[in-house]
Image (cartoon, rainbow, N blue to C red):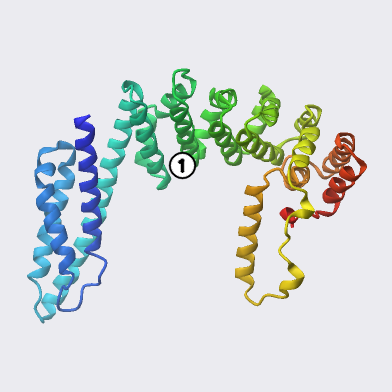
Amino acid sequence: MEETQENSNKSKLLESLNKASKDLLTKPIPMYTYTNLAAIKTFQELHAELDPVLTTDPTLSNLSQLVSNLKTQLNNLQNSQGHSLKSFVRRRIVDHEISCIVASIDVEVQAWINRETIRNLVRVLLDSDDEEEKAKALTRFEKRLSSGFNRDLQELVLKAKVFSILESMLSESKCSIRVFEQSARAVVALVKFNKDVFVGQVLMGPIVRNLVSKASHGSIRVLSSLVKLIKSPLVYEMEAQGYIPRIISLLYSNDRSIVIVALDCVFEIAFFARKEAVEAMIEEGLIKKLVELQRLEIEGDSIDGGGGESRGICEETEEKEREMGRRERGLMEEWPFASCVTRFIVQLEMGDGLELGERRELKQEILSRVREASVSDAEATAIVSEILWGSSPLLR
């Protein structure tokens, strides 16, 4: 624990050093005087605080040398403030040297933080029994990945076999739901980080099966995110392994939050599903369940459409569009099951998995199932009309 705290403090100091060195370049150096004195003072204070750390940690030897070189160049710059041509040229040369050193410091700091992040993550996940510590390490790892692709970081991840460790966390029955879901989000972050490397590992491993089996709010949200990222290959795998009916079964849960995320997952799957998969979804009673969910929701015509006629033509078009976007997102949050049959069909029609003829055929089949599932002619007419004409404000 003491080592973890020490490295955490060291990481904060190095990030402060990185910022302070970059601040030296935020103001252009004038022709005759260097006026960024506040940045120089901050750098010097941090250098004094960090010097014992830099000189005693072998992994920071390169960074220690760079910081020393930067301090030397700053002194050279301040000593080259004459009005002669020679002083002017020298300032330009030193300015260039400072820029190069600052860039190298950034690389060294990021490399150290990457190494520490991966080392700490592996240590905590493999050796610690503290669930809170595991969750925090996973959160730091996910944040690090979100900063963008970095080849050195990828090499560290692969060498440490981080993906395999995360797989084991998602297979471990004793793992808390918090750590399970945070591990799953870390997998999503890895796929975003580099699809070429990590998509194949997701498809070939047990991760999808474990997410479906866990059937928690967080695990199904992660599954939806993976479908968005991996698209058709993941949907094909889910179809082949029989996972799609299990997602549909979650629509019958007594937990409303589970039903909501399961419905979102069904919509994501529909966008990439082939005809055979959609037919299987229909045979599983999906349309009947969507009609039931829609029946439980507030009727579409009771939702305020925004008073388009009374508002007239708005001159501030962009603001109006933003407001409409906020209103529709609010409607979706407040009435998550509204127009769900139509939304399912929209996903099929806009998706990548079906040919034009297949879309038409399946749409007719869905319309037939809607009529069968409706409790009255009025309900059937309302839903069919919405499908054919898109009358819901959620779909405009």
Q: Quadrant of the N terminus?
A: top left
Farthest residue to the bottom: give it.
83
Q: Quadrant of the C terminus?
A: bottom right
- Between residue 129 and residue 62, name the one nearer to us: 129
Farthest residue to the right: give it.
377
Q: Secondary structure at mark 1?
A: helix
Picture coordinates of residue 201, whole percent (x, y): 51, 28
Say which amino acid is labelled 1.
Answer: Phe
Residue 10 found in image quarter? top left
Picture coordinates of residue 152, whole percent (x, y): 34, 40
Residue 264 found in image quarter? top right
Picture coordinates of residue 301, whole percent (x, y): 79, 54
Tell me if residue 94 can be seen: no
For label 1, the residue is 193
When the figure is inspected, residue 106 is found, relative to residue 348, above or below; the finding is: below
Q: How many marks?
A: 1
Residue, x 73% and y 55% (percent of image)?
Answer: 303
Farthest residue to the top: give it.
173
Relative to 141, 77 lies left or right: left
Residue, x 10% and y 38% (percent of image)?
Answer: 56
Relative to 306, 130 lies left or right: left
Tell me if residue 116 can be seen: yes
- Between residue 153 and residue 266, name the one nearer to us: 266
Picture coordinates of residue 138, whole percent (x, y): 39, 34
- Between residue 72 and residue 391, name the one nearer to us: 391
Residue, x 60% and y 64% (percent of image)?
Answer: 322
Pointer 1: residues within 10 angstroms few (<14), some, or many (20+)? many
Residue, x 80% and y 54% (percent of image)?
Answer: 390
When the figure is inspected, residue 123 is found, relative to residue 66, above or below; the finding is: above
- Between residue 80 and residue 384, name the one nearer to us: 384
